[in-house]
Image (tube, helix red, strand yellow):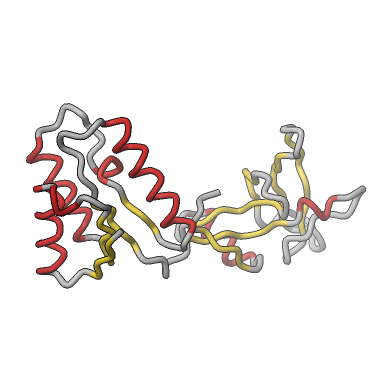
Amino acid sequence: MKEYMRQIPFTVDMAKKIHGGLIKGEIKTREGGNVRGLIFNVNNEKWPLCAVVTKNNGKEIVLSFNLDGSALPYMDTSVFDLTLYVEDENRKKVYISLPITGMEMEKVVSKANDRKKLLSFKGFDPVIPFDVSPDSNASYAEHMGRDIQALLECDAVYFCRGWQDSKGCQAEYEVAKIYGKQMVFE
């Protein structure tokens, strides 16, 4: 499950929207097991839903569910009750600006991923340059173009230490300033 999902109560209407791709989300069991092949309107008034669910041991079983997502009771099937997760639209999207050129690439990627995890843990939707421009053979201009585009699609910019010594970060700072992006400095 993606980190920026929030749990909501199960409803058939919302499950249909998620299942049909109208809303970004996931249908899981109460304990986080995968649910696939959800079928609506099964010819059974009391248990009108049916799905293939993954058990803790990795095996799949077919279960029936009522309209509130509760599994047909046999043994301990309450762990298979259906739960909905939807993308949290309220998360601020944050671009992480950090010096890259002339740096040891392994350390830069590690630092970027560390900051990404930290900001995600704090409730943000972080974007790093390596997400938007992963092609190591691209030119500097291509990387900067993609980075600026990503920055403009974000709500805020997080500047890592040393940004003042990087021409790319300085350019990102100027763009963030011009477009009134919220800025946070490490």
**Left or right: 145 in relation to 44:** left
Q: How many marks?
A: 0
At 10% across and 37% down in the image, what residue appears?
140
Identity of the residue furthest to the right in this view: 75
Q: Where is residue 93 in the image (x, y as percent from the top left)?
A: 33, 61
Q: Relative to residue 21, is residue 105 depicted above or below?
A: above
Identity of the residue furthest to the bottom in this view: 180
At 32% across and 51% down in the image, what residue appears?
127
At 33% across and 44% down in the image, what residue appears?
112
Quadrant in the picture for the C terminus: bottom left
**Left or right: 14 in relation to 90:** right
Foreground of the two, 168 or 5: 168
**Left or right: 18 in relation to 41:** left
Q: Where is residue 157 in the image (x, y as percent from the top left)?
A: 26, 61
Foreground of the two, 100 or 130: 100
Foreground of the two, 162 or 46: 162
At 20% across and 40% down in the image, what residue appears?
100
**Left or right: 66 in relation to 141:** right
Q: Where is residue 51 in the image (x, y as percent from the top left)?
A: 69, 47
Q: Position of residue 143 (x, y in %)?
A: 15, 41
